[in-house]
Amino acid sequence: MSTDTPGIDPLLALRAPQDPACDVFLTGTVFLDIIFTGLDSAPVRGTESWARGMGSSPGGVANMATALARLGLHTSLAAAFGDDHYGEYCWDALEQGEGIDLSMSRTVPGWHSPVTVSMAYEGERTMVSHGHEAPAPSAVPGQAGAGPTETAPNPAFPQCPPRARAAIASLAPGRSEPWVATAARHGALVFADVGWDETGRWDLDALPDLAHCEAFLPNAEEAMRYTRTDCPRAAAHALAERVPLAVVTLGAEGAYAVDGRTGAAAQVPAIEVEALDPTGAGDVFVAGFVTGTLADWPLADRLAFAGLTAALSVQEFGGSLSAPGWAEIAAWWQRIRTCESQDPTALERYAFLEELLPTTARAWPLRRAVPTIGFRQ
């Protein structure tokens, strides 16, 4: 990521001395992602495939943390890091490179970092991962924020999250994370996504932490299965009876959201782009929506911004590598307004960016840094 990204704070007008220092807290597993792009087709057994592009970066929950930090939110991540070179690289890339607060994180001696190899082709991706669950913090030496060398007990990880404006959770059937209720009780707005229900039951009551959520952001298929509906929009309205904000992503059709408090609904179409790698696009969408919500933007503007950031991300490879900052957003806005074939109505949808973005922006397309282990930027 370029270091000349404009330092825009989307919450500047709302900040007050009594506010928490942390804007967003999240926890989860950090992977080392190794990404291959430019494959003409899926790898074939017994053959060697050559990719035209390759890079490595922190992945897993780091995708979301990076997307939030690049949008100017003060982000705190609680995660375990291996004491191998992969873990050291990921720690440095997130703390020094992205400015993410890792004081709630820990280094686990003798535990190797989880790794994912991602192969992008034909607009899709195939991933192979390896890793083991990190040992319980109370049973393993590891001081929160100590980094690779210091050791001490850390029983608080991650059940005692810091005070924050928002927290992001990943829900799973039959599982409850105590920290989610704690965060909500301390005033954080909880935003949650969900994965595929391997049990096949698709029961909202099996997601106990949903009761603590401000917003729920499933994709269309997940939303319809959980609500027993055959239309993503109907599913969003049904979900809005359970959470204040229901946001359903519709793939190429964009996204649809319902405010359960007011009954207001909004839909914003997707931006058509040439996708290089979709890795992490869902995380970037959530980060954009969280940013707009904390900034108190209208619902349609939040959806538009989330969709825009996700669209910009798929034009670059890798999860955390591809997350756009304000420099990328400003460059896109400057370029799109000069396109003679641009539909004025579509352009008006993003006019709210005018007050946020710097008056000058770098030329499009932007050249991004490509961090790889072993190279210095």
Image (cartoon, rainbow, N blue to C red):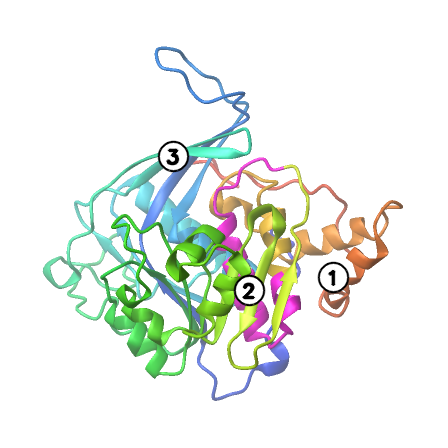
In the image, what residue type sits under mark 2?
Phe
Range of magenta residues: 275-303
* Residue ID at (28%, 70%): 208
Disc 2 secondary structure class: helix
x 58%, y 35%: residue: 276
Res 127 label = 3
Q: CA distance from mark 2 to mark 1?
A: 14 Å
Residue 170 place in picture, x, y as percent:
35, 60
**Residue 135 counted in the magenta span:** no
Q: Which residue, given by chain and number where applicable, does mark 2 sit on? A: 289
Q: Is residue 222 left or right of residue 301?
A: left
Would you identify the image quadrant in which residue 167 lies?
A: bottom left
- Residue 2 shows up from this direction: no
Residue at label 1?
350
**Cβ atoms at labels 2 and 1 below 8 Å apart:** no
Amino acid type of the residue that numbered disc 1 sits on in the rendered structure: Tyr
Q: Please state which of residues 113 and 194 is positioned toward the viewer in this rendering.
A: 194
- Assess whether residue 298 is covered by the magenta stretch: yes
Can you see residue 369? yes
Spot occupied by residue 65 in the image (x, y as percentages of width and height): 44, 58
Which SS class for mark 1? loop
Q: Position of residue 295 (x, y in %)?
A: 59, 75
| Mark found first going from the N terminus, 2 or 3 | 3
Answer left or right for 284 relative to 129: right
